[in-house]
Amino acid sequence: MRISKTVFRLSALLIGLFAATETFADAESSFYEKEHIRGFISVGGDYRNMNSEHIKYINRLLFAGGKGFVVEDAASGDSTKASFVGDKALSSYDHFDDYYLGLHVNIGAQYKQFLTWFDVNFMPTQVSEGDGATDASWFAYGADWMFGWKLFGENTIINLIPAVGIGFNLLNLHFINSYDILSYDGGAIEDQITVTDMRNRYYSTFAMTFNTELELRFSIDPISIGAYAGYRFIRYNEIEVEDVEYGSSDVNGDTFFIGARVTWTFLSPWQKKQRDRL
């Protein structure tokens, strides 16, 4: 699997810094006070705009197919040439746009100004209906391990929180299975052409991610409302369809996003003790 050098280096640096922090915490028991750690959960949604190469990759795979057949020699009956003809049903499908709605559930912990959380992201399935046997559709989901810092202190009403993280994304495509995918690598056409029979199922391709975001948060403990924006680096590889790889490698799947979230922060063990004393 090809991963861009930038994403790989940033990911390695982030993992290294986190490992160093954990080692120091183990060596110095007083590095942090566990009773002051607060858990939190948040839900949110955002508008996501894909890189043009990303949406072209999806549309090219879903709508660039056709019907394959073999022409037989009339005299001998031998199959001599594989041919390709466009499927008119494909023209009845609308191509997908370069934006979609992203939905998120975040589960994490806060210690003073430092935050870390898992951002589980998914999206409603995008569907294009046409005259083929099935609809064309796609969706993606993934997760990022995020690290953030409250710039204006731990308990201020207004805060600014930059964050970075690493994770993965899974792109899922459902083809119009009224046609076959054909590929041709050159040479004698009867030897080099590949015809792949589609099935009524989703096909997937995996990618590593590097996520960056900046959140403006308004807090009245324990509830916070935040507006955020960011950029998620994604590099997709070929997609495997019935043991044959199609598409391109190292496809730029980056997305820019802007959205809002609501966060509930739980009391720390220390806060619970103080409350019980009252």
Image (cartoon, helix red, strand yellow):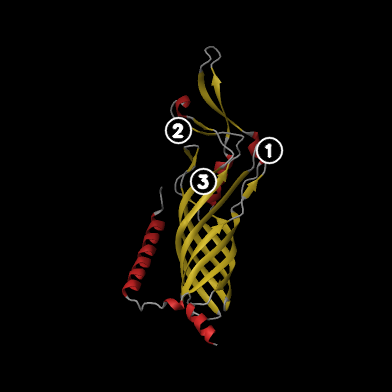
Which of marks 2 and 3 precedes in the sequence? 2
Between disc 1 and disc 3, the foreground one is 3
Quadrant where the image shows the C terminus? bottom right
**Residue most extreme to the bottom:** 278
Q: Is 45 on the left or on the right of 162, as rendered? A: right
Distance between mark 3 and mark 2 Cα atoms: 23 Å
Q: Residue at coordinates 59% horizontally, 55% vertically from top-left?
A: 123
Which element carries disc 1, helix, strand or loop?
A: loop
Q: Residue at coordinates 52% horizontally, 86% vertically from top-left?
A: 277
Where is mark 2, residue-wise? 185
**Residue most extreme to the front:** 276
Distance between mark 2 and mark 1 Cα atoms: 30 Å
Residue 2 visible within the image: yes
Which of marks 3 and 1 precedes in the sequence? 1
- Work out whether residue 275 or residue 52 is closer to the camera in this orientation and state it: 275
Residue 169 image point, x, y percent: 49, 54
Disc 3: CA contacts within 10 A as few (<14), some (14-19) or many (>=20) = some
Disc 2: CA contacts within 10 A as few (<14), some (14-19) or many (>=20) = few
Instruction: Give the residue type at disc 2.
Output: Asp
Instruction: Give the residue type at disc 3.
Output: Ser
User: Is the Cβ of the residue at disc 2 closer than 8 Å to that at disc 1?
Assistant: no
Residue 66 image point, x, y percent: 58, 34
Distance between mark 1 and mark 3 Cα atoms: 24 Å
The answer to whether residue 249 is above or below residue 227 is: above
Instruction: Give the residue type at disc 1.
Output: Asp
Residue 151 image point, x, y percent: 47, 77
Which of the 4 image quadrants contains residue 121?
Answer: bottom right
Between disc 3 and disc 2, the foreground one is 3
User: Is the Cβ of the residue at disc 1 closer than 8 Å to that at disc 3?
Assistant: no
Where is mark 1, residue-wise? 131
Which of marks 1 and 2 precedes in the sequence? 1
> Which of the numbered marks, if any, corresponds to residue 204?
3
